[in-house]
Image (tube, helix red, strand yellow):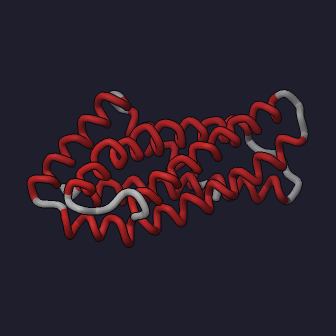
Amino acid sequence: MNPTEILKHEHKIVLLVLNGAESIAQTLNDGGNADIVTVNKMVDFFRNFTDRCHHSKEEKQLFPRLEQRGVTNQGGPIGVMLQEHELGRARVRAIADASVKIEAGDKSGSAILAENLSAYVELLRAHINKEDNVLFAMADRVLTDADKQELFEAFEKIEAEEMGEGAHEKYHEFAHEVAGLA
C-alpha cells in the first residue's frame, strides 16, 4: 500500500475527532459545560494516535526519506510541517492543563479549553490540508517503489512497537464515537 494513502486515511480519523473537539469548544463558547471525560480521551487520542503514531511515521520515516530524495527541510515544506507538529503539541498540553483546571473546579479553565480546542482544530485542519494536497503529492512523485515499500513496512513496525496490539483499532473506534458529537 502507498504510504501516503495510509497517512491520508489516518488524517480522516483525526478529522473525526477534530469535529468532536470543535463541538465541545462551541458548547463551551455558548456557556455550556465540557464533557471532561471525553476531553481527556481526546487528549489521549491526540497524544497517542495523532502524535505518537501518525506524526512518528512522518517525522521518523517519511520526512527523512523525502529529504534523501531532495525535498528541503529548512525553509521548505518539511520544516513547516515539523513546526506545526510542535505547535500542535503545545495546544494539546494547554488542552490537558485546562481540563485539569476544570476538574479542580477552576471556572477559568472553560475559556482556556475552548480557546485551545478551537486553535488546535484550526491548526490541524490546515496542516492536514497542506499534507494531503501538497506534501503527499510531492512525496508520490519523488519516492521510488522501493521507498514506498520500505516506508509501508516501517509504518507497520511503528504501529506494532510504538502503539501495541489493538491500539490503532481502539483509537479508530473512539474517533467514530466522537464523530457522533459533532
Residue 165 in percent (x, y) is at 32, 28
Q: Is residue 138 left or right of residue 163?
A: left
Quadrant where the N terminus is found in the figure: bottom left
Residue at image coords 20%, 70%: 141
Q: Nearer the viewer, residue 182 or 154?
A: 154
Outermost residue toward the front in this view: 74
Outermost residue toward the left in this view: 146
Q: Nearer the viewer, residue 41 or 176?
A: 41
Quadrant where the C terminus is found in the figure: bottom right
Q: Is residue 88 left or right of residue 56?
A: right
Q: Nearer the viewer, residue 12 or 69?
A: 69
Q: Give the total of numbered labels.
A: 0
Residue 21 in percent (x, y) is at 65, 52
In this rendering, the answer to whether 141 lies above or below 56 is below
Residue at image coords 27%, 55%: 67
Residue at image coords 63%, 54%: 120
Q: Quadrant of residue 4?
A: bottom left
Residue at image coords 39%, 40%: 53
Residue 168 in percent (x, y) is at 38, 39
Q: Quadrant of residue 158?
A: top left
Q: Is residue 36 left or right of residue 104?
A: left
Residue 149 in percent (x, y) is at 13, 50
In this rendering, the answer to whether 42 lies above or below 123 is above
In this rendering, the answer to whether 158 lies above or below 24 is above
